[in-house]
Each structure stands twice: as structure tokens, then as C-alpha cells.
């Protein structure tokens, strides 16, 4: 269901919905609005769009509800943080939100495709169990959302969701053991036996070779390439490109100059000559309200065939952070994003054009926009990619990959794998069972919360009861940059 | 309930307002410190505007331009500390960290005119909250409003044998945390567990009415607030109501006058979805000169936006000055984060401190803290198993 239809449905639902939210729905609504408070004040329509997007499917809700997960982990009440294997220290480097749709293939400097974390909006230091359970629960959520076209196949996957999560937990533990014993951190450069990853690699290679993004979002006319405007895909009517206001557009060369300096091996300055730019609306879920732009740059030569697309995305403080002891923090948001990414990837140049900058005072992440850098999507878990075996196989790879991420040496621990494995070694089988049970409980809770979230929106309104005051409106130039999504 | 709360508080504030007095009609005596504007002798009767601005615009801001004879009380409290913290590294060893910190920097101004006074307190705070990198000019210490209230008292002049009514509105101290902290009188050593756990805020936007009983028998008070504390904006239509009673049952006996029985109840809500947030506190306190001590129990119904969650805080503390200038403080508290759980979800905190009052406004302390989480709490809050050693200085004017 598209977001536009969702909004209309929410309006209709409001007329007949129960006029009270349940205590759990109230908790979810308050956790979300507390985390989004500043955004709600400054760009309420964009936050309303995010909340509407979260109601489209279970994984959409899960992706957008990191603050709820953080609340449920930290605060007492649920089973999420109950464990025999909790570890006070060290905290590990991580993305903070390692659900399966935050993994995908990246094209390294030598063209190799590798499976890596590809979203660093909430990257920081975290307890390893926080990250592991976030990922395992996402597999349970994925089981609920797989096979959207086949109810019986979906039920078969749902019935075996605990086994899927347990497979990933076993892989995590065994990989952690290997890293604790000195194994080198290796990249994942092929699909192995996973049908889901095979699909990812196949489409990724095809679209990288074809430079598919240029065909999808640009037009070449008279030897000059420009970006399209408007709705690009009728199936996603809220994902649109619009003209950038003059002042942020004029600032882009400076933004890209700073970004270039943040790269590991920066290309020549001419590479980043701006040819065109647009404001993108309706992309992502948690980052839906954030400023995002697509910039068309010259690339290696004046030949339009090697023009490059860059995504410029606003970054902010993580909605799930706050675990670090006094004195442990990054200097800036930009350094948080780039240093975590380059540390936890198997190689620092896993995505050579991944950097950061500042745009009109906003910290931004800048990366190559390549259609071939495919991300795992629950919507593609159908047919032979939606079977319990396929999800278990994917879980095995992701569990191992997360162990590799957590084994990354950091300024707070040179050997985090040793500390983590020391905790698990007493009973790895019980560890796997405990994680599977926690993932099952929380994944099912998230599926129920997704329905409750729609109900809360219908009762409390599109901003979950938040009141917007006119005095909080941003100044005109910033308001122009935020823009208004087409609804 | 929300309307009822609001109506009650409005009525209470109205009742607290002092009646018009005959001497209001007489201009006050000239003040040598009178600011520019209408001179004190020209101050109008209460029912009229000042004649000094006939034919001209009054100053754009009235503060300091009223011409009233006032009593001015500036104030400052600075608590600075060095902290060494040690915690487990997960592999049998320990990790440590140390830092200089400014737990409190308060600047205040209180102005009184007859039975009306007002007070503003600014406090220093880090501009970025925990886990954030986006602050003001890096993560600077910035000033925010801790208190900003106006108060009216009746009668204007009262002795300890009189019944006194006062009403206060603005960013006002709440009724429970200040009573416990005011008994402890050692904020430099640490805040009350009630505040540290987030169960209650020491101040909020709203109003209070306080009835002080004659002969130092205690007080009754009622407050109505937004409910999100002074650090946050109101998020819902619900308002918090707080009722507090402090009785000194042996006030007629000099030696036993410090004994107080305190009780309070907060009926509140939090978050945009009006999650329940009620608190009930009972305490036995000793508010003497040499000994300040107490034992309190707070039951919480509705915690951190979860209206069903329950928990409690048990707190036992003592501040003693056994010989002149020597200050000894001890505190033990148990915070049950979720009392519904079968397995204990608690954090026990022990604090001990020895201090010395070097000169009257200057005190120094060495404090030791131990935080002991249960297994359940430690899993949810990694890093909560630690000890700290602190060296603290405090001045208060």
C-alpha cells in the first residue's frame, strides 16, 4: 500500500477506531515523539510522512522504530535485555540498527562487490547484545513480512521464525569464537549457498555494469545529462525529485570540496563538478524527514557516460545512542559516520566514495548513488527467496557478518572478540537458545506494535499527539531546504 | 481529571492571592537604589498605573523600571568536582575514566517588595544531551532557567505562630524532591535518588500553593504542573497534580522539633499519549542543625512512558556535623526499576563522603560511590556496575 493510500486509510480509520490507545501503544507513541521532538517542531509534515511510511508494512514499522527498541532494551518490563550473557564492557562499534535491510552489497575500489552494513545514521558504540538482538528480531520480522504474495508460504516461514533466528545466533557465536582465537576479519564477497544473496549479487553486478542509475533517474539531451524531476516510480508515488532552492544549490560546490577531503583516496577536484542537483523526498523510513539530495557530478571525464550520482543525506545524533561512558565519543557527527564505517567494513575502501561534509550547517553523509549497490529487501523474500531455509541461510551469513563487525578493534578495546567470547564460551548452545527466544518474543511484539502504531496514528493524529507551535518554524532559507513533500 | 486538576490549581492560586490592603493606597518610601523611570515617590497606588509615564511611552521592558523599593538578594552556588570511575572491562579487568566536572552552577536573583517576591535561578548545563554530538558551539556549558517564579504571601508580616498562605507560579520548585534534598543539605555529595532515577523532577512549570501551619507544625501544599519537568516542553493535555504534607508532630518540644513526617502524592501523565505517571512518597525526616537524616520510600506507577510499569526507590541518608566544620554524609538507596518482574531488577547505590567547611561559604568533600546493579539491571544498563572516587568543592552565597 502506498503512503498516499495509507494516509487516506488512516483518516478513514480515525472515524471508526477505538478512541483510546492501549498502554503499550501509548509507550510506543511517546518513545517515538520524544525521539522526534526536534524534528516535529521544525518539519512536522516530513515527520508525519515518516509515521505514515511506517504503517505500510511490518518491516517499515521496525525500521522506523529504533527509539522504541532502545526504550524497550534500556527500560525494564520486557524480555529484550534479559540475558545470562550481558557484558558491561567493552562496548562495540556498530551501526546501532543492524536490521537486515541495513545490509547490502557495496562496490569496493577495485570493483569487488562485498556484503556490508550500508547505513550509518545511528553508528556509534553499543552493547553487543543490543545490536545482536536488533538483528535477530529483524529476521523474525522478516519472516512475518516475507511471501507477501503467498499466505501459505508466509505461514510456513512464520512457523519457523525461531529456527531462523537461532541459526543466525549460532553463526554469530561460532564466528566470534574464531575471531577471539585470532581469525582475520574477512569480507563476504560471494553469495555462497544463499538464494537471497545470489539474487543480490546477480542484480548488483548487472546494474553496476549497466550504470543503471543513469538510465533510471537522468536524461541525456544534446550531450548534456540532467536529473529527472517528479515521481520516478509510479509504485512509489511519494519518492520524488524536486528542484533545490537557490541557496542550498549554490552551496553544493563547497559541500563537495569538504566531502572530497574526507575520502580515503579522493579523485581529482574536477570529478565533483556539479552538473545538476535535486531535492529527494520520500526515501528511507527512519531518515524520511531528513534532508536528502541527489547531485549529478562530472565524474572521471567530460563524457556523459561516466557522470556520477551522489546522495547527500543529512545526519544527526543517533536515536539509540547514549551508552558510552564519560569521555568516549566522536568529535563530530561526520567523523562518527565515516570512522565507524571504515572500521567495521572489511576494508576501508569498501565504498570508496563514502564520506561526509557540512551543508548549510547540517552534517551530511555523501556517497555514490549506484543502483548496483543493492540492499536486502523483505519485499523480495518471495518464491525460493522466501522459504524458511532461504531466511536461515541469510541469517547464517548476517550472524557471522555481525560477529565480524563486533570483533573490530576500537579505541575502547583492542580485542572485543575475546571479551565477548569469554562471556559466551560457558554455554554457546544456551546462548543461541536465549537469543532465539528473545528475538522471537521481540519480533512478534514488533509485529503487534506495527498494527498498534496504525491505531495510535488514527487516534492521536498524524504526529501522535504532538502539538506544533508556529514559533518553532525554521527560518525561510532552512524551511526551503527542508521543503514540503508532495502528498 | 485534567480539567479538574487545572480548575483546582487555578482556584487554589486565586485563594492564595492576598486581599487588597489599606496601605496599598499609600506610596512606598523612596528607595536610594531606585532605578531610572518613575521614582519611588511617584509609584502609583495598587489600583493605578504610575503617573510618571503620562504622555510618554513606558520602557519596553518593565523589569527594573517599576520604581518600587525592593530588597535584592543575589546568589551563587558552584559545585566543582573531579571524578575517577572504574568499571569492569568484561574480561576480568577494569576500565577507568576520570574527568573534571561541574555538577552545579547556579546564579540567582531574588527581589522582594512587601509580601510579593520573585526569584530567577539560572543553571549551567551541557548543551548536548547524553549520547549527542550536536550541541551549542561544540558541547558548551550553557545557561538555562532552573527557577523563575513570582510569589505572594499572606499575611505580609508573620511570625512562627501564624498561619501563612503563599502562592507561587512560573518555573517553580516541586514539592517532594526539594523537601528530601532540603533535608539532606548535601547536594554537593549527590542528588536525591528520586531525582537521579528520573522518578521526579525538582522543578516544573506550573504553580503551587503552600499553607504553613502555626508554631512550626509543618505545612500542606498543592501543586499543578505540566508534568514533563523543567527540562522539557509540555507534551500532552494532562497536568500533574502534587499534594504534599509535612508534619512536625513534636514541634512543641524544642529537642524533638526537627522530627518530620512527610508524605506526598503525584497524579500525573507523561508523553504525547498520556501514559500514567503517579508517585507516592512517604518519609520520616530529621531536620536538625547538626544532624539531617531521613528514610523515604517512593512507589512509582507508570515509568518512562509505560503506564503499566511499577517500581520504587528506598532511600536512607544522613548528613552529620559531629564537630564544628567536619561534615560526614552517608546515603544508601535501592532503585527497583520494575517491581513487576520476578527476577530482581534493581540498582543499589551506596555513597559515603567526608567534608570540611574551610571557611563559611567554602566546603570540600571526598566522596566514594558504589553502584551495584542486579544481573537483570546490568544487562539492560551496561556500565552500571562501577565505583567512583570524587573530590568536590562547593561554595554557596
Image (spheres, coloured by chain):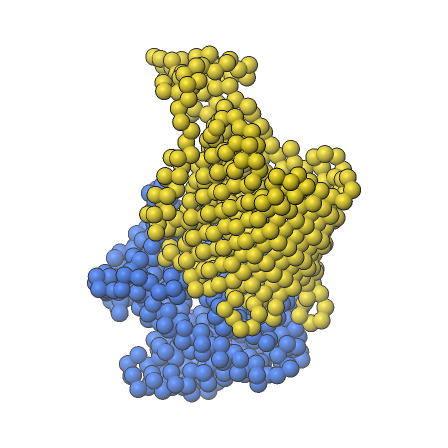
Chain painted in blue in the figure:
A
Q: Between B376 and A66, which is closer to the camera in this rendering? A: B376
**In the orientation shown, which residue stands out farthest toward the front?**
B252
| Up-down relation of residue B127 to residue A415 (above or below) | above
Q: Is residue A28 above or below residue B102?
A: below
Q: Nearer the viewer, residue A50 or A118?
A: A50
At horizontal 36% and vertical 20% (from top left) the residue drawn is B47
**Residue at x 56%, y 25% (from the top left corner):** B72
Q: Nearer the viewer, residue A160 or A178?
A: A160
Look at chain B in the picture and name its colour. yellow
Q: Is residue A322 left or right of residue A419?
A: left
Percent of width and height locating residue A297: 40, 57
Closest to the observer, B364 or A276: B364
Residue A208, quarter of picture: bottom left
Q: Image quadrant for the C terminus of chain B?
A: top right
Residue found 53% across the figure and 76% down from its top: A401
A123 left or right of B185 in image = left
Q: Is residue A318 above or below residue B36?
A: below
Residue B41 x %, y %: 46, 12
Q: Residue at x 66, y 66 (%)?
A: A413
Q: What percent of the width, then of the height, locates residue A206?
A: 38, 76
Asked if residue A182 shows in the view, the reply is yes
How many marks overall? 0
Would you say residue A359 is visible in this rendering? no
Expressed as whole percent of the image width and height from the top left, the position of residue B188 reads 66, 45
Quick check: B321 left or right of A3?
A: right
Amino acid at each position: 500500500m502506498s503512503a498516499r493510500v495509507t494516509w487516506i486509510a488512516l483518516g478513514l480509520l480515525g472515524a471508526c477506531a477505538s478512541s483510546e490507545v492501549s498502554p503499550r501503544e501509548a509507550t510506543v507513541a511517546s518513545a517515538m515523539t520524544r525521539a522526534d521532538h526536534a524534528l516535529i517542531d521544525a518539519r512536522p509534515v516530513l515527520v508525519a510522512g515518516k509515521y505514515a511510511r511506517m504503517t505500510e508494512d511490518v518491516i517499515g514499522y521496525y525500521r522506523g522504530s529504533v527509539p522504541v527498541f532502545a526504550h524497550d532494551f534500556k527500560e525494564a518490563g520486557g524480555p529484550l535485555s534479559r540475558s545470562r550473557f550481558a557484558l558491561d564492557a567493552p562496548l562495540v562499534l556498530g551501526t546501532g540498527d543492524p536490521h537486515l535491510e541495513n545490509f547490502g552489497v557495496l562496490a569496493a575500489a577495485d570493483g569487488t562487490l562485498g556484503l556490508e552494513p550500508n547505513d550509518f545514521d545511528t553508528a556509534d558504540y553499543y552493547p553487543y547484545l543490543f545490536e545482536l538482538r536488533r538483528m535477530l528480531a529483524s529476521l523474525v520480522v522478516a519472516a512475518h513480512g516475507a511471501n507477501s504474495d503467498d499466505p501459505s508460504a508466509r505461514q510456513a516461514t512464520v512457523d519457523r521464525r525461531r529456527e531462523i533466528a537461532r541459526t543466525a545466533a549460532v553463526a554469530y557465536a561460532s564466528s566470534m569464537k574464531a575471531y577471539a582465537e585470532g581469525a582475520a576479519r574477512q569480507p563476504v564477497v560471494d553469495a555462497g549457498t544463499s538464494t537471497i544473496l545470489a539474487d543480490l549479487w546477480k542484480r548488483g553486478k548487472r546494474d553496476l555494469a549497466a550504470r543503471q542509475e543513469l538510465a533510471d533517474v537522468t536524461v541525456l539531451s544534446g550531450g548534456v545529462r540532467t536529473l529527472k524531476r517528479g515521481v520516478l516510480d509510479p509504485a512509489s508515488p511519494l519518492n520524488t525529485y524536486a528542484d533545490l532552492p537557490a541557496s542550498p544549490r549554490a552551496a553544493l560546490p563547497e559541500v563537495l570540496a569538504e566531502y572530497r577531503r574526507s575520502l580515503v583516496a579522493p579523485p581529482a577536484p574536477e570529478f565533483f563538478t556539479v552538473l545538476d542537483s535535486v531535492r529527494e523526498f520520500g526515501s528511507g523510513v527512519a531518515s524520511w524527514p531528513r534532508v536528502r539530495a541527489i547531485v549529478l557530478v562530472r565524474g572521471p571525464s567530460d563524457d556523459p557516460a561516466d557522470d556520477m550520482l551522489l546522495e547527500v543525506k543529512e545526519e544527526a545524533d543517533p536515536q539509540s545512542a547514549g551508552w558510552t561512558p564519560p569521555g568516549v565519543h566522536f568529535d563530530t557527527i561526520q567523523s562518527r559516520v565515516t570512522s565507524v564505517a571504515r572500521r567495521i567494513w572489511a576494508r576501508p575502501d569498501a565504498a570508496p566514495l563514502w564520506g561526509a561534509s557540512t551543508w548549510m550547517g547540517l552534517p551530511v553523509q555523501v556517497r555514490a548513488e549506484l543502483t548496483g549497490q543493492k540492499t536486502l529487501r523483505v519485499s523480495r523474500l518471495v518464491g525460493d527467496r522466501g522459504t524458511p531455509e532461504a531466511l536461515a541461510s541469510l541469517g547464517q551469513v548476517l550472524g557471522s557478518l555481525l560477529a565480524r563487525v563486533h570483533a573490530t578493534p576500537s579505541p575502547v578495546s583492542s580485542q572485543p572478540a575475546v571479551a565477548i567470547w569469554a562471556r559466551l564460551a560457558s554455554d554457546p548452545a544456551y546462548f543461541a537458545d536465549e537469543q532465539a527466544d528473545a528475538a522471537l518474543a521481540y519480533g512478534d511484539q514488533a509485529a503487534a506494535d506495527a498494527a498498534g502504531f496504525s491505531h495510535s496514528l488514527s487516534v492521536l493524529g498524524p504526529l501522535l499527539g504532538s502539538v506544533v507551535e508556529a514559533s518553532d518554524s525554521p527560518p525561510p532559507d532552512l524551511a526551503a531546504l527542508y521543503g514540503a513533500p508532495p502528498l | 481529571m485534567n480539567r479538574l486538576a487545572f480548575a483546582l490549581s487555578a482556584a487554589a492560586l486565586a485563594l492564595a492571592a492576598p486581599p487588597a490592603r489599606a496601605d496599598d493606597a499609600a506610596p512606598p518610601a523612596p528607595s536610594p537604589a531606585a532605578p531610572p523611570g518613575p521614582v519611588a515617590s511617584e509609584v502609583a497606588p495598587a489600583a493605578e498605573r504610575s503617573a510618571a509615564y503620562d504622555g510618554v511611552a513606558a520602557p519596553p521592558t518593565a523589569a527594573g523600571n517599576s520604581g518600587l523599593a525592593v530588597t535584592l538578594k543575589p546568589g551563587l552556588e558552584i559545585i566543582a568536582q573531579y571524578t575517577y570511575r572504574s568499571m569492569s572491562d568484561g574480561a576480568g579487568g577494569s576500565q577507568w575514566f576520570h574527568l573534571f566536572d561541574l555538577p552545579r552552577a547556579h546564579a540567582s536573583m531574588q527581589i522582594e517588595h512587601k509580601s510579593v517576591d520573585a526569584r530567577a535561578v539560572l543553571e549551567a548545563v551541557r548543551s548536548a544531551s547524553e549520547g549527542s554530538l550536536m550541541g551549542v558551539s561544540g558541547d558548551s556549558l550553557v545557561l538555562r532557567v532552573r527557577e523563575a517564579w513570582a510569589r505572594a504571601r499572606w499575611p505580609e508580616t508573620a511570625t512562627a505562630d501564624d498561619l501563612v498562605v503563599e502562592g507561587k507560579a512560573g518555573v517553580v520548585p516541586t514539592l517532594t524532591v526539594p523537601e528530601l534534598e532540603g533535608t539532606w543539605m548535601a547536594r554537593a555529595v549527590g542528588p536525591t535518588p528520586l531525582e537521579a532515577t528520573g522518578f521526579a523532577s525538582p522543578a516544573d512549570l506550573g504553580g503551587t500553593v503552600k499553607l504553613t501551619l502555626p508554631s512550626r507544625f509543618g505545612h500542606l501544599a498543592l501543586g499543578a504542573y505540566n508534568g514533563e519537568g523543567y527540562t522539557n516542553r509540555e507534551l500532552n493535555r494532562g497536568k500533574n497534580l502534587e499534594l504534599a504534607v509535612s508534619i512536625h508532630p513534636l514541634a512543641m518540644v524544642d529537642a524533638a522539633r526537627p522530627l518530620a513526617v512527610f508524605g506526598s502524592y503525584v497524579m500525573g501523565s507523561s508523553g504525547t499519549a498520556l501514559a500514567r505517571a503517579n508517585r507516592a512518597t512517604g518519609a520520616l525526616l530529621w531536620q536538625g542543625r547538626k544532624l539531617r537524616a531521613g528514610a523515604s520510600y517512593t512507589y512509582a506507577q507508570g515509568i518512562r512512558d509505560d503506564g503499566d510499569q511499577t517500581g520504587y526507590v528506598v532511600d536512607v541518608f544522613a548528613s552529620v556535623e559531629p564537630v564544628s566544620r567536619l561534615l560526614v554524609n552517608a546515603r544508601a538507596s535501592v532503585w527497583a526499576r520494575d517491581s513487576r518482574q520476578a527476577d530482581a531488577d534493581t540498582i543499589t547505590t551506596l555513597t559515603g563522603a567526608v567534608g570540611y567547611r574551610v571557611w563559611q561559604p567554602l566546603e570540600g568533600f571526598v566522596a566514594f560511590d558504589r553502584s551495584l546493579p542486579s544481573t537483570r539491571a546490568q544487562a539492560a544498563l551496561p556500565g552500571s556496575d562501577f565505583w567512583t572516587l570524587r573530590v568536590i568543592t562547593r561554595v554557596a552565597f
